[in-house]
Image (cartoon, rainbow, N blue to C red):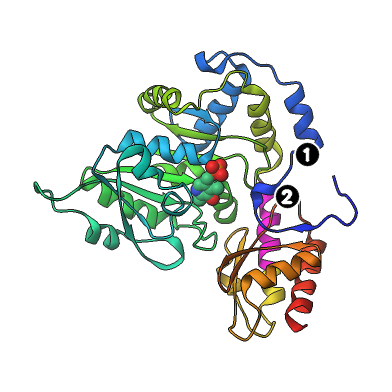
Amino acid sequence: MATPNRPIELRSDTKTKPSEGMRQAMASAEVGDDHVGECPTTRQLCERMADLMGKEQAMFLPSGTMCNELSIRMHCGPGDEIILHESAHPLHFETGAPAGLSGAMVRTVTGPRGQFDAAAVEAALRYPDQYSPRSRLIEVEQTANLGGGSVWPLAKLQEVAAVGRRHGLALHMDGARLLNAVVASGVPAADFARDYDSVWIDLTKGLGAPVGAVLAGTAAFIKDAKRWRQMFGGAMRQAGIVAAAGLYALDHNVERLAEDHANARLLAELIVGLPGVQVVPDEIDTNLVFFDLADDLPDADETSARLREHAVLIGAMGPRRLRAVTHLDVTESEIRRAADRLAQVLSD
Ligand SMILES: *Cc1c(COP(=O)(O)O)cnc(C)c1O
């Protein structure tokens, strides 16, 4: 619901609030005990999500972080090594959980825009001897969050997976924003996820639901994952109340992600000409706009604070780096206004 003078919220697509229609779907959801698979709404969501991701089964979890960490726990044991990009979410935003919950090591690889290639994986693989950790899992992020919301090309995902398979590694896809990649590229989610053993989608980012994420894999993987879910404390009872928001989001909030992408591109185009602002509009694949401020401008924290005084919320992501995120609660005219206010703040 639009309130006059509401701040323009560009800190994250997690800030989206359930719409009126979504709330009605939640209020009228049929529910049962999801611990034992008796919640019809949750089952329906999981069936649709499994289909969408091209997997046999899926499971509803409270958060994307739990999808990552539960998968890592299932794929890895103590001393096993995960190959992932140096900007990957489990490395920076999950409080050390790969070590804390799974005893796993992380081996970072690099590459432009949050992505890496088959050669980088080859170079990171451990030689299997009695001294080395065991290379066990490859993790990719589609889209790559700190990579600027970049979309991995399908061929690159397939090449990386092929190396992993050849060496007996498991493959995990963090698909927090997988549907942004789908809408931006036209490639079906199932194609992106085909070679990956576990894959998940967040309902609380651009999809606009209040709670939850859905993890998919083979029937055997999901059966086992239900034991781990219980151990992690992530099994829910009448989960259909929140799963209904996910179903509503699949019906109403997927295709419209294209608007968010257009707004992100527009924002980059509006600010690229501002003195001292560095951004590459052509690299805005989806809904994340990272931009950098030159040394003669105020730093990111100060710029963020000044923007806040002008009712524009944009988060600092580094000393001179900011991130603006577009989503269903921000309109094109708000994007134009946000760009104007940034210009004003930087010229003051
Ligand atoms: C947000 C996010 C997560 C974590 O999801 P939550 O639902 O917030 O726990 C994981 N990976 C990526 C790439 C994300 O953007």
**Left or right of residue 73, residue 215 in this image:** right
Is label 1 within 8 A of ligand 1 (CB to nearest ligand atom)? no
Q: Look at the image and say whether residue 163 sits in the magenta stretch.
A: no
Horizontal and vertical percent position of residue 235: 51, 23
- Which of the two labelled residues, at mark 1 and mark 2, occupies the earlier sequence position? 1
CB atoms of marks 1 and 2 within 8 Å: yes
Above/below status of 19 relative to 157: above
Horizontal and vertical percent position of residue 301: 64, 69
Distance (Cα) linking label 1 and label 2 = 10 Å
**Residue highlighted by disc 2:** 328
**Left or right of residue 331, residue 152 in this image:** left
Crowding near pointer 2: few (<14 within 10 Å), some, many (20+)?
some
For the point 77% across and 31% down, the residue is: 23
Q: Main secondary structure of the magenta part?
A: helix
**Residue highlighted by disc 1:** 19
Above/below status of 239 relative to 90: above
Give the amino acid at mark 2.
Answer: Leu
The quarter of the rendered structure image containing the C terminus is: bottom right
* Picture disc at residue 191: none
Magenta residue span:
255-266
89 or 53, nearer to the observer: 89
Horizontal and vertical percent position of residue 80: 25, 43
Is label 2 within 8 A of ligand 1 (CB to nearest ligand atom)? no
Horizontal and vertical percent position of residue 163: 26, 52
**Left or right of residue 298, residue 320 in this image:** left
**Local secondary structure at mark 2:** loop
Q: Look at the image and say whether residue 256 sits in the magenta stretch.
A: yes
Residue at the outermost right position: 4
For the point 62% across and 13% down, the residue is: 32
